[in-house]
Every structure is written in C-alpha cells, then in structure tokens.
Amino acid sequence: MAQEVIKKDKKYTWKEFKRQKFLMIVSFFMVVYGLIFYYWPLTGWLMAFENYKPRKGLLGSDFVGLAKFKFLFEDDVFIRVIRNTLAMGVLNLVTSTIMAILFAILLNEVKNVFGKKLVQTISYLPHFLSWIIVTGILHDALSSSGIINELLLKFGFVDQAINFFAHTQYFWPIVAFANCWKETGWNAIIYLAAITSIDPCLYEAASIDGAGRWAKIKYITLPSIKPTIMILLLMNVGNVLNAGFEIQYLLGNGLVKSVSDTIDIYVLRWGISQNDFSLGTAAGIFKSVVSIVLIVIANYAAKRMGEERLF
Amino acid sequence: MKKQKTSLADKIFVVCNTLFMIAFVVVTLYPVLNTLAISLNDGVDAVRGGIYLWPRKFTWKNYQTVLGIQDIIIGAKITVLRTVLGTLIALVANALLAFVVSRKRFLFKSQLSLFWVITMYVNGGLIPVFLLYRNLGLTGTFWVYVIPGAISAFNMLVLRTYMQGLPDSLEESAQLDGAGYWTVFYKIISPLCKPVYATVALFVAVWQWNSWFDAMIYNRMNDEYTTLQYELMKLLSSVMQQGGNAANAAAAGATSAAVTPVTVRSAATIATMLPIIMLYPFLQRYFVTGLTIGGVKE
C-alpha cells in the first residue's frame, strides 16, 4: 500500500528527469513549436500602438499610443461592424442551439431503428461540406429563378421574384438559416448522447403514472440534458465573435455591406488589402479582448449556477 | 381506457414527427440532389430552368469541362497532398503531445497542458500571424498548409482524454520489462488508441479538404499551390459577385473570362464534395465518439 503511494508520487529528482528523457525531448519541441506559432504572434500586438512600417520593423516604427483605437471607435463603419458581428453571432447561437435540441429530442422519439439511423446519417452531411459549397448551393436556391422563389410564386405569396441578396433585411436570417442547415445534425450528436444516457427507469415510472410523450419530454428529457445545454451554451459564448467570417465574406456583396461586414472582414480589408497592419491588428485585439471577457463571464456564470466550470 | 387515449395522442405525435423528419431530410438533401441533376444536364438546356431531381438532357460534358480546367487539376493534386500529408503530420504531433501530457509521472504535466490550453483562448489574430508566416518564409510555399495547423489544443485534448482512460498498469508493466517511453507509446498506447486516432484524423482531414482561406491569403500569387476549394470559389464568385475584396473579384473574373455556365459550376461543386460524401457514412462511429469525448472536459 505504502509502496503504491510512493510510486504514484512525482519525484523532482535528476534521476527521474533523466528517466523521462524521451518525454522531455518531445516537450521541448512542442514548446518551441507553440512559442513560434501561437505565442510569438502576440508580440505583433505592439503594432496596434504604433504606425507600423514593415521597413522600420516592429521596434523601429513610430509609437502612436492609442491613436489607432481612437480611429476605430470614431469610425462609424467599425461600430456597425461590431453590431453585425454580435447580432449574427447571437442569432446563430440561439437558433442553432434550439434547432439542435429540437432535432435531437424528436429524433430520439423515432422508434424505427433503420429510419432513425438513416435520418441521422443524412443530417451530418452538410457539416462536411465547405462554406464555399454551402454558399454556392444557397445562392442557387435563393436566386431569382431558384427553388425558393419558384415556390413563393407558385403559392402566390409574392407577385414577382424576390432578390434575396439585394435587401439588407434578409441577410441575417439567411445566415442563421445557412448555419442551422449546415450544423443542426452535427450539433445534435452531443444532445443525443446525453439523451441516450438518461436512465430508462425514469420514463417507465412516468408511463406508469400516466405521463404522455409531452410530459415525459418536458419533465424528464429536458431537465436531464439541461447541464449539457448549459455547458455547450456557455462554451460557445466565447466563440460568438468568431462565428463571423466565412459565410459573410462569401455571401456578402456591395448592396448588403452595411449588415454583412463583420470584424474579421474589417481586419482583412484594412490589414491585407489596404496594408494598414496597425489598424488591422488593433481591430483584431479588440475582438480577442472582448472574446476573453465573454469567456471569463461565462465561466463565472457557470460557477454561480452550480454547473461544472469550463476551465 | 386510459391506454386508448394515450395511444391516439401517440399516433398523432408519430405522424407529426415522421412528417417533420421527412421535411428535414428533404430540406437537407434537395439542394445537393438538385445540384447533382443540373451538373448532369446539358448547359444550354439548363438555362430554361425547371430541373429538379433528374436531368432533362443527360450529358457528362460538364464534368469533362471541369476536368479540362488546368487550375482545378493542380488544385485537386495540392488538396489531396495537403490532406494526406497534413493529416499524417497532425496525427503524429498531436498524439505525441497527448501521450506526454497524459503520463501521470511526467514532471511538467500540468505546465505543458496549461501552455497548450491557453492557445485555445488567446491568439495573435490575422495580421500578426500573416506577418509571422511571411517572415518564416512560409507564404508562397506548400508548407503553409501543413506546418502551422499541425498541433491544435482541441485535438490534443480529445486524444489526452482518451489516453487518460487507459489503465496505468499497462505502462508500468511494460516499463518493468525494460521498455522506454517511446516503446510504450509506439507498441502499447498507440494500438489501443486506434479509434480516437481515426477520430482526430477525420477532423483534420475534413478541415484540410475544405480549407480555402489560406490559399487565398498566403498563396494568392502562386497558382502552382492553389487548392480545389479556392478554385471552386473563383468559379462560383464569377456569379456571386464577390463582396469583400475587389482585387480578388477582379482576379476571379480574369481567370474565368465570362460567367461560367451553371451546369459547369454544379459539376465542379459535386466533384469537390464527392470524396467526402462517399467516405463520411462509414466513419460515423468515429466522429460520434470523438465529439462525445471532446464535449466532456476533464
């Protein structure tokens, strides 16, 4: 027994260090790699506080303090871009969570094993397609001769085809729909796993008490998967600002710019296209800081609600 | 009596639920099947519209056209290469790292874990990363696709969680027999980790296959390192009137002088998604396990 304890204990001795030579060598390379590819770019944040000129280098460029940030917050475009990113991020998070839970619960009610398996397999499909493909397909479906307009015309909802990509009011719902279309089946995997692990006795007991399907879903399934829902929701809160690049970049156009541009697109435009590295970096820092604040708040909220902490 | 009542409500529920599932399947599959039908239809005929699930004037010509586009062939080769090589490198690197941080007696176990977990939450952002790759001489090469993404904290955590679940006695008894850590990793842990290796390989492979942004940013001027998705984007954007980057739209316009016919675009889309569609149903159990492990943190 005593021997067992000693064996599990870590010993910080030279002999043990040498015994772990292989682990040390691997760790060394992993740390070097991490420092170069993940930590070194953080030194680039310095650019946001200077008028960076590649010729003069990071340390030689003129220091301008918070001037770049001041420019950002006085730029109406940037304020709009923040609004767009937050709005689409929150809309996507809410709709995709609700859809995934709904789909998981309803799929779980399907008793035909083959049908269930088939629907589930089909539901994963869009997740594996790139945004290039998804936006291409969506563009065809929503075009003036596409299936959506055809159906709307046929059933008399509209008199003439709607140009969905020319009006600002359609853009956010289109993005939310595309996101649900692509990820509902995938996101449901984890909820389905949670539902499967519910003790069947609970359902049997409820049946004996005369509970119908709705009662069982409402009083057993939903409360049982509540911790999973909370954890995933909180985990994704930190990603709200990260959800705004590919689809907006691919679907956006000059007509809907005011609602489609996100922080990442702003960074890309100023940083890479206009070569203003300082301004691009400043906008990027703003995004990172807000994300970290959101994560900390989410973590704190998780603790307060008695859920498992996120990190 | 009571039983009867519930069974009527039950029947209504089953019918509604079945209808919901059918609607779900139709909404998911129709756009893909419609694209497939258009890709197999004659180009001039397709302009008339009205093609739904079956081609009206069948032809393979669109696929021949796609295969005749030089950039797409180059893109396909690069994409296959980056998917294979990138997945191999990422798998070995992540597995080694996960092995190290899952050893109970490893002296810097928690420090190394923390070092990598931080990278999930803090990153330099697009511009500093762009400058780094340029300074390292990675831009304008093939390696920018496989080196930077080789280790990701998320994949490492999935692997680590699985390895931590294996009994310690395996490692201990091997070491009593004189095996070093490399032997333990290679001969004992890795064979047991095959399912989770498959999961991570699948995640990385899909990510590699679907990437386009890196080709656009880091290899815009290097047509020999273009990727399939990026070429597809150029084809599609000639119609979609790319927003965002004006220079890029101009470049896309130049390569495909006129607007590409819808049938050719559809053929390119189908060709790009085909490998993944054919493979993923057989890999289901792997990603389901992977997600379940990944979702449960410590």
Image (cartoon, rainbow, N blue to C red):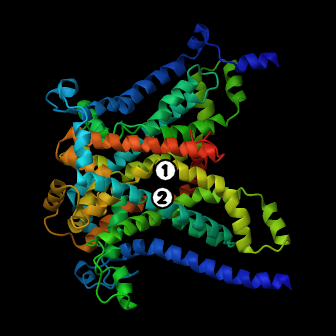
Q: Residue at x 57, y 26 (%)?
A: B110
| Callouts 1 and 2 close, C-beta under 8 Å | yes
Q: Residue at x 41, y 29 (%)?
A: A34
- Residue behind mark 2: A93
Q: Nearer the viewer, residue A34 or A22?
A: A34
Q: Residue at x 26, y 40 (%)?
A: A69
Indicate the position of residue A260 as horizontal and vertical percent values: 30, 61
Looking at the rendered structure, the secondary structure element under dot 2 is helix
Q: Earlier in the sequence, mark 1 or mark 2?
A: 2
Q: Nearer the viewer, residue A47 or B269?
A: A47
Reply above or below: B139 against B262: above
Cα–Cα span, label 1 and label 2 = 8 Å
Residue B197, quarter of the rendered image? top right
Given the image, on which type of amino acid does mark 1 rest? Val
The numbered dot on residue A237 is: 1
Looking at the rendered structure, the secondary structure element under dot 1 is helix
Indicate the position of residue A101 as horizontal and vertical percent values: 59, 63
